[in-house]
Image (cartoon, helix red, strand yellow):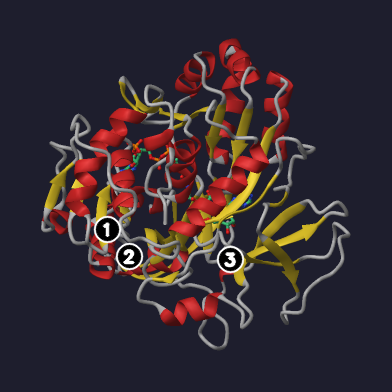
Amino acid sequence: MSSLFPALTDGPAGRTALRFGDRSLTYAELAAAAGPLAGRVAGHARVAVWATPELETAVAVVAALEAGVAAVPLNPKSGEKELGHILADSAPALVLAAPGTDLPPPVAALERVDVDVDARGTAPAPAGNASAETPALVVYTSGTTGPPKGAVIPRRAIAATLDALADAWQWTGDDVLVHGLPLFHVHGLVLGVLGPLRRGGSVRHLGRFGTDGVARELDGGATMLFGVPTMYHRIAQALPDDPGLAKALGGARLLVSGSAALPVHDHERITAATGQRVIERYGMTETLMNTSVRADGEPRAGTVGVPLPGVELRLVEEDGSPITSYDGETVGEIQVRGPNLFTEYLNRPDATAAAFTADGWFRTGDMAVREPDGYVRIVGRKATDLIKSGGYKIGAGEIENALLEHPGVREAAVTGEPDADLGERIVAWVVPVDPQAPPAEGELADHVARRLAPHKRPRVVRYLDTLPRNDMGKIMKRALTS
Ligand code: MCA
Ligand code: AMP
């Protein structure tokens, strides 16, 4: 297969490809830095990338993809237990990291290759022997129970999703994207870094999201903003006191939200202050992008638009029978099929088989209706044990298991509760071993943050004498409300 990034060799060599803070690389420099690194990793099946929000991460992933090697992005804030699981499961040959970065024990045990963004070698021979089905990324994603699963994303899916978005958003090499998303998930990495590079455009990464950085970059030539709803919520909160932010957003070509639903109230506040409509797109680690409001379509708050080119989407009843009505009322599970889909969960044939129907449709678990003109409106999720907090998907079971490993916890149940900023916040319901001396809230939050990741920590802990259970002994989570 040819390169995923034709602009590395055929594009405007002097155009800025990547900018992180005050460090940037042109296309020519990126090709020259990725070349030697691609040579270094070539021949391996998978390499890990220590995915700090830095230039090195982008160069490392580009080098791996140019070599036809799958990159496994690691969240640098993941705890030892989570990292240990990901490394044992994906067995990367080595880890690519920024020079000088400290790597924690399970990662430090791997052979390390420092990413030299100043290297100037020859551009990589595109993609080695890679085919369209060769894995490009393995991205770990939480399920309702058990540890995260590695979604194997082939090169074909990345090309298909980015080209479909180019069509839907009129996204070209003239666009300059700004965002502050993490680089170990699809949103920040595939859309936010590989997207601009496939178009021959530019990305400016903020390092850390903040409304000041958004205003500065949109005022200074950036044309598009990507963010999760929490980021747009924070923008909506800041707008009344920040005319500069309003002006900068007002000048943008496209504001895109995704990873969770953006509340209509935030849509309205942003439009009122800036004159701009935020558009939403709907995706998933396993499917990359499925639908979007189109740049040339009618923006409609509360919907995720229409299926992207090449994506088949249907709604099905509980028994799997397709819903044919477009009435804005009949709720069904979204199933999708198309070149944007992942191949499998690594080492999990059982989970892969369960995720697809016999005729190849992927079961998203998202519940939606379709409006008469085809716009999709997501109304909820099938599994109550999946929590979306700050745009991160978090499995309740994983946090329950971590809590149960704390010596002061006898029983634990985890739920999601509405939160204006995060969408949902994680609530831990805990039966302590010693009711007279229960482990403190902060201690339990730290315990989960250390083992798994800080975004998986409970924001609230509620102590109970017993958990409500049905006759079968199953915890009745619906009874757990404050
Ligand atoms: C706090 N911190 C702690 C603890 N408490 N660290 C260790 N132990 C603790 N007990 C640290 C955190 O690591 C963080 O550090 C800081 O304190 C604040 O934490 P937190 O409150 O969690 O962060 P926040 O400021 O509220 O973050 C909001 C956010 C973030 C920026 C919106 O949630 C975010 O980046 N979300 C994006 C998620 C995303 O990209 N999802 C895409 C997946 P520090 O501040 O240094 O970090 S979905 C996807 O890819 C699909 C395909 C799709 O459709 O897009
Ligand atoms: P993840 O598995 O972390 O990739 O998250 C995918 C999930 O995020 C989807 O299954 C949806 O539940 C949710 N999601 C993504 N984009 C949107 C959106 N625009 N509106 C509502 N939910 C979304």
Of the image marks 3 and 1, the number of the one nearer the N terminus = 3
Q: Are marks 2 and 1 in contact (CB under 8 Å)?
A: yes
Q: Residues within 10 Å of mark 3 (few under 14, many from 20)?
A: some
Give the secondary structure at mark 1.
Answer: helix
Q: Secondary structure at mark 2?
A: helix
Q: In the rendered structure, which amino acid carries the disc numbered 1?
A: Arg
Taking the image in four quarters, ligand 1 sits in the one at top left
Q: In x, y percent, where is residue 294?
A: 71, 40
Task: State which quarter of the image contains the C terminus.
Answer: bottom right
Q: Viewer-proximal residue, 110 or 131?
A: 131
Instruction: Pick whichever, 90 or 244, lies toward us.
Output: 90
Residue type for callout 2: Ala
- Provide residue 392's location: percent of width, then percent of height: 47, 51
- Is 59 above or below relative to 27? below
Q: Which residue is mark 2?
A: 402
Residue under the image location 16 percent in, 59 percent down: 106
Residue found 28% across the figure and 55% down from its top? 447
Q: Nearer the viewer, residue 80 or 44?
A: 44
Decide: few, some or many residues near mark 2? Use Cα within 10 Å; few <14, some 14-19, many ≥20.
some
The verdict on label 2 being within 8 Å of ligand 1 is no
How many labels, in total? 3
**Mark 1 highlights which residue?**
451
Q: Residue at 72% x, 78% y: name it.
A: 318
Instruction: Give, as a three-letter code, the residue at label 3.
Output: Thr
Q: Are marks 3 and 1 in contact (CB under 8 Å)?
A: no
| Alpha carbons under labels 3 and 1: distance apart | 23 Å
| Viewer-proximal residue among 110 and 416 | 110
> Which residue sits furthest top?
243
Sequence-wise first label, 3 or 2: 3
Residue 384, label in figure: 3
